[in-house]
């Protein structure tokens, strides 16, 4: 799976939050690429995104890529285990 959005020098803007929120309308898991020019690292960027999106979870940070999860409110297909 490829990242569907990039966070750059402007960081996590309202536009970025809206774009990620809208992407969750069609999928439960997605990746966000944090560019070198971003003002915060991938972990902080992921935490900012999930705090701005209801029911979103930071699953993993791989280098500069953030993996986010939000269950489908009506028919969740993916279930994360408590590890």
Image (cartoon, rainbow, N blue to C red):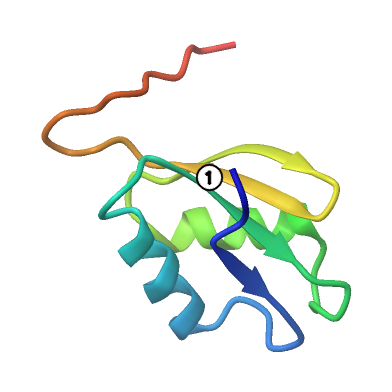
Query: In this rendering, would 26 be left or right of 73?
Result: right
Quarter residue 69 falls in? top left
Query: In this rendering, would 72 be left or right of 19?
Result: left
State the SS at label 1.
strand
Q: Is residue 27 above or below residue 38?
A: above
List the residue tagged with mark 1: 68
Q: Residue furthest bottom?
A: 10
Residue at position x 74%, y 42% in the image:
61
> Residue 31 appears at what percent x and percent y?
59, 51
Which image quarter is the N terminus in?
top right
Toward the viewer: 65 or 56?
Answer: 65
Q: Is residue 76 above or below residue 53?
A: above
> Residue 83 appears at what percent x and percent y?
60, 11
Quarter residue 42 falls in? bottom right
Residue at position x 62%, y 51% in the image:
2
Residue at position x 81%, y 55% in the image:
64
Quarter residue 74 falls in? top left
Q: How crowded is the residue under tag 1: few (<14 C-alpha within 10 Å), some, or many (20+)?
A: many
Q: Is residue 39 above or below residue 52?
A: below
> Residue 55 appears at what percent x and percent y?
34, 44
């Amino acid at each position: 799976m490829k990242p569907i959005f990039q966070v750059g020098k402007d960081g996590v803007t309202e536009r970025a939050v809206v774009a990620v929120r809208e992407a969750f309308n069609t999928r439960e898991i997605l990746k966000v690429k944090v560019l070198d020019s971003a003002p915060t690292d991938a972990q902080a960027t992921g935490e900012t995104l999930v705090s701005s999106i209801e029911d979103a979870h930071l699953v993993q940070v791989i280098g500069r890529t953030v993996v986010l999860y939000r269950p489908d409110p009506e028919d969740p297909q993916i279930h994360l285990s408590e590890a």
